[in-house]
Image (tube, rainbow, N blue to C red):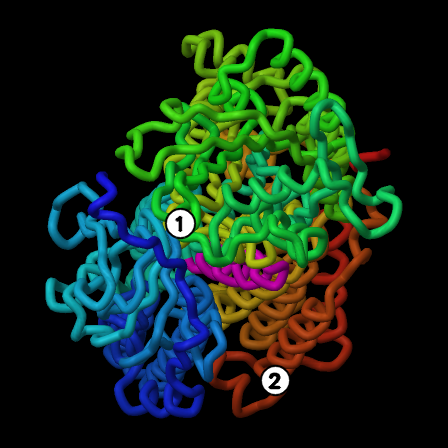
């Protein structure tokens, strides 16, 4: 660019822009609707009801009702129809609950926008953007709506999703438009919104979100396979029972009814429902820890995490950069210990050029610290230049970790160039000799050993009449000095890192800082800081060497965002399950490649958040550890719920087949199965989901990615416990029949013992610990409420005559009812003994 085409680069300013008022924005939001494409992923009440009516359980109930009508029992048919209505209501309410949880998560995860409201920049959800809103755009933001550019500071936008062109499109003031869904890849800008929602270019192209489906996952696939297998087994057993009934007792309608009854009890429809409820409600629990779950599948993976890769700045540290030390000509000045308030003269130039090498209106914490130090220590001196024009910027690149600004002022015959970057890069730009490089390296190490982030500053002059060079190396730079910045460790980090290590999770710190700085910060955080691997050393390794190095390295320094991807791939090659944090545009590939990408909510860019599975709303490392702890808890609770659910299906099989084989009246009818299904589902989805989990959750190593939801031992335990309940209830029923108790009374007693026995099974199923002391330890209030509701419902259907008749029961005498209750409670002993045999109590 020649001198005849000079244009003054303008920073984004908002002083002259008031934007809309909050009241006007709310009025427009109400009248014009939210800034959405009109895609509703929320199912209607009719859609939910229709889906329930297609469920096998519903169809079996309808079939059983028709059979009762055929055999002349309209009363029983009406009762079953009543249960059909109850099942629809309960299922729809539960679906609504899950949808509400997911809606809340969608609201949190919608793209954000920085709007000027009442003259104040305010962060709002993208759906709240309205026409004529004034939005501030920064690198990494996704544009929330269509609009006209009001200000542009080296603004360039990736519009490939609209045009297919991969080249970024530069934008100019008051001339160009920006479009919803496109990505700001460079610079800053201000826009005025002209179209929202379906009126945008993106909205006109099509509502592509309607085609988005929840991706499958290993856990979902495993549960689906288990459900299909159990459904197939249940179908075969039901057909066998129907044939056996017909051959032994005759009556094809009665035999068909017996088969339907067993099929209703065997259908494992709870499994996928329980999983969705656990994951959705688990995401809500994690959100309370200020961690947003953008993909429910990530909750499954949290418990498998073996390596946690984290940024230093803002994640381990408070991201409150402050200039702590200055070094000029080998003399180190500690600002905290500086006598008086005046900066010695020979340090003025260092602060001056650090500011000139920074943005005019900075957002980077380091540049904010430079400006703050200059305003404090250089006020009233000739070293501040608000009247100078910034006419050329040279950006930081992976090849050269330095950036330069070229300034012009009419009173000067030359342009002034300021540069800042890593000490190695600035020494290279200044073409220093070996002795000088060694001295600077020693000064850098001395500051880095104190945990300071060290930057170097250089200066140059360039004739105003000569064309600007294309690269920074073409300037004749002089070395000015070093600046050390301090960023304190977050107080909660050392304990959180220690918790990760106890849980078998390796914490890896990745930073762009000097290796000595990285080692010092890692030591303060409690991260093992032996060998530090730099980005240059990483780039020089082949894939095999990189995998070997990464396996034993805990601290990476001088790493570019692009090299994060190489670290992730090397860890994955070592069969590690990787969680990775990031915040920038260039972090997106690494976040997407990691098993769990974790984006920063406050300082992160939209593109990073969209590539991530989790978003830290407070950029807090301790929140990651809390999410991992909750992920382990959710998986453990889901496993116990599945084991319990499988176990309570076994008595249904036994009580459907054994009376037939022993020549006794059948115990269970479709109405009984329907009631059991309404008891089982709440017990699983509420009681187990609310469990706080074992105290050892973060003391055991991560579970293997190949580990099944239900192991062989747990399957055996489930079958054994179900068989014990079956044996106890069947023995009690046979005893009642032998003593001549009326069949309707005996059936009610057996049903009572079965429900109480299933309720008792909750206690040994709450934890994998086989100890007796753990049966009732740490009970949540939910357990009490569920048991109270279950027992109340049981008493109602057994002792209220009008209800008992519908269930083909007769109210038993009080002592017999107490005996049935006692049998159910007594089953707790063999159930716990079975668990203790297969899951011995852990100690220590």
Image coordinates of residue 195 in percent, x first then y, are 21, 75
Magenta span: 273-293
From the image, tell me which residue sits under label 2: 796
- Give me the residue at 63% from left, 13% from top: 436
Residue 800 shown left or right of residue 395 in the figure: right
Secondary structure under tag 1 reads strand
Residue at 53%, 34% (x, y): give it.
420
Residue 281 within the segment the image draws in magenta: yes
Is residue 507 visible in the rendered image? The answer is no
Q: Main secondary structure of the magenta part?
A: helix
Task: Tell me the CA gap for discs 1 and 2.
Answer: 82 Å
Q: Classify 836 as above or below 491.
A: above
Residue 390, numbered circle: 1
Residue 408 visible in image: yes
Crowd band around label 1 with a 10 angstrom C-alpha radius: few (<14), some (14–19), many (20+): many
The percent position of residue 784, horizontal first and vertical second, equals 72, 71
Instruction: Give the secondary structure at mark 2.
Output: helix
Q: Quadrant of the N terminus?
A: top left
Pick the residue in front: 346 or 770. Answer: 346
């Amino acid at each position: 660019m020649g001198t005849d085409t000079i244009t003054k680069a303008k920073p984004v300013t908002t002083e002259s822009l008031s934007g809309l008022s909050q009241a006007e924005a709310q009025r427009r939001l109400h009248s014009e609707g939210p800034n959405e494409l009109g895609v509703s992923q929320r199912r209607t009440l009719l859609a939910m009801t229709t889906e329930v009516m297609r469920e096998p359980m519903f169809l079996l109930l309808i079939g059983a009702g028709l059979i009762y009508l055929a055999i002349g029992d309209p009363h029983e048919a009406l009762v079953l129809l009543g249960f059909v209505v109850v099942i629809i209501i309960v299922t729809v309410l539960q679906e609504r609950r899950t949808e509400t949880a997911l809606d809340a998560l969608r609201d949190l995860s919608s793209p954000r926008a920085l709007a000027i409201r009442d003259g104040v920049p305010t962060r709002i959800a993208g759906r709240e953007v309205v026409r004529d809103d004034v939005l501030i755009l920064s690198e990494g933001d996704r544009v929330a709506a269509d609009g006209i550019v009001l200000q542009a500071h080296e603004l360039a936008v990736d519009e490939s999703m609209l045009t297919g062109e991969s080249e970024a499109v530069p934008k100019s003031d008051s001339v160009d438009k920006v479009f919803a869904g496109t990505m700001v890849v460079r610079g800053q800008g201000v826009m005025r919104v002209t179209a929202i929602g379906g009126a945008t270019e993106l909205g006109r192209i099509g509502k592509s979100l309607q085609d988005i489906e929840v991706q499958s996952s290993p856990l979902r696939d495993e549960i689906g396979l288990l459900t299909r297998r159990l459904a197939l087994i249940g179908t075969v057993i039901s057909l066998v029972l129907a044939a056996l009934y017909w051959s032994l007792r005759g009556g094809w309608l009665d035999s068909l009814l017996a088969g339907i009854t067993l099929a209703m009890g065997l259908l494992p429809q709870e499994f996928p429902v329980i999983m969705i409820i656990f994951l959705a409600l688990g995401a809500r629990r994690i959100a309370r820890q200020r961690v947003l779950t953008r993909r429910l599948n990530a909750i499954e993976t949290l418990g498998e995490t073996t390596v946690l890769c984290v940024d230093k700045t803002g994640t381990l540290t408070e991201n409150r950069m402050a200039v702590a030390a200055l070094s000029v000509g080998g003399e180190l000045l500690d600002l905290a210990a500086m006598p008086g308030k005046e900066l010695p003269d020979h340090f003025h130039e260092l602060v001056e050029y650090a500011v000139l090498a920074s943005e005019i209106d900075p957002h980077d914490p380091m540049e904010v610290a430079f400006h703050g130090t200059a305003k404090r220590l250089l006020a009233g001196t000739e070293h501040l230049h608000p009247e100078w024009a910034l006419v050329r910027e040279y950006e930081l690149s992976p090849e050269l970790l330095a950036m330069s600004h070229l300034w012009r002022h009419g009173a000067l015959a030359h342009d002034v160039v300021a540069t800042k970057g890593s000490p190695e890069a600035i020494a290279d730009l200044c073409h220093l000799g070996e002795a000088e490089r060694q001295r600077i390296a020693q000064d850098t190490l001395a500051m880095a050993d104190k945990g300071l982030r060290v930057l170097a500053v250089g200066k140059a002059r360039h004739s105003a009449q000569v064309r600007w060079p294309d690269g920074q190396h073409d300037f004749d730079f002089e070395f000015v000095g070093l600046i050390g910045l301090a960023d304190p460790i977050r107080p909660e980090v050392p304990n959180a890192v220690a918790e990760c290590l106890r849980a078998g999770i390796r914490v890896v710190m990745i930073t762009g800082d000097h290796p000595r700085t990285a080692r010092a910060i890692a030591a303060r955080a409690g991260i093992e800081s032996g060998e530090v691997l730099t980005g240059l050393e990483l780039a020089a390794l082949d894939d095999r060497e990189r995998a070997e190095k990464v396996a034993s390295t805990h601290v990476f320094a001088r790493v570019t965002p692009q090299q994060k991807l190489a670290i992730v791939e090397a860890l994955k090659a070592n069969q590690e399950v990787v969680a990775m944090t990031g915040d920038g545009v260039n972090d997106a590939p690494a976040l997407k490649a990691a098993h769990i990408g974790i984006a920063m909510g406050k300082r992160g860019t939209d593109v990073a958040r969209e590539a991530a599975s989790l978003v830290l709303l407070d950029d807090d490392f301790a929140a990651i550890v809390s999410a991992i702890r909750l992920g382990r808890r959710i998986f453990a609770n889901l496993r116990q719920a599945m084991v319990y659910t499988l176990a309570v299906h076994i008595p249904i099989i036994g009580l459907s087949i054994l009376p037939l084989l022993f020549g006794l009246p059948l115990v269970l009818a479709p109405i009984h199965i329907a009631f059991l299904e309404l008891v089982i589902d709440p017990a699983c989805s509420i009681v187990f989901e609310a469990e706080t989990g074992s105290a050892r959750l973060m003391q055991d190593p991560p579970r293997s990615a190949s580990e099944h939801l239900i192991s062989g031992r747990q399957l055996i335990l489930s079958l054994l416990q179900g068989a014990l309940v079956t044996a106890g209830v069947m023995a009690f029923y046979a005893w009642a029949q032998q003593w001549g108790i009326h069949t309707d009374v005996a059936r009610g007693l057996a049903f009572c013992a079965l429900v109480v026995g299933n309720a008792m099974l909750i206690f040994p199923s709450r934890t994998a610990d086989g100890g007796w002391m753990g049966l009732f330890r740490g009970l949540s209030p939910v357990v009490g409420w569920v048991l109270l509701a279950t027992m109340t419902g049981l008493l109602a259907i057994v002792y209220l005559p009008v209800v008992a008749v519908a269930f083909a029961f007769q109210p038993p005498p009080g002592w017999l009812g107490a005996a049935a209750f006692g049998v159910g409670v007594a089953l707790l002993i063999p159930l716990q003994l079975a668990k203790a045999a297969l899951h011995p109590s852990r100690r220590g």
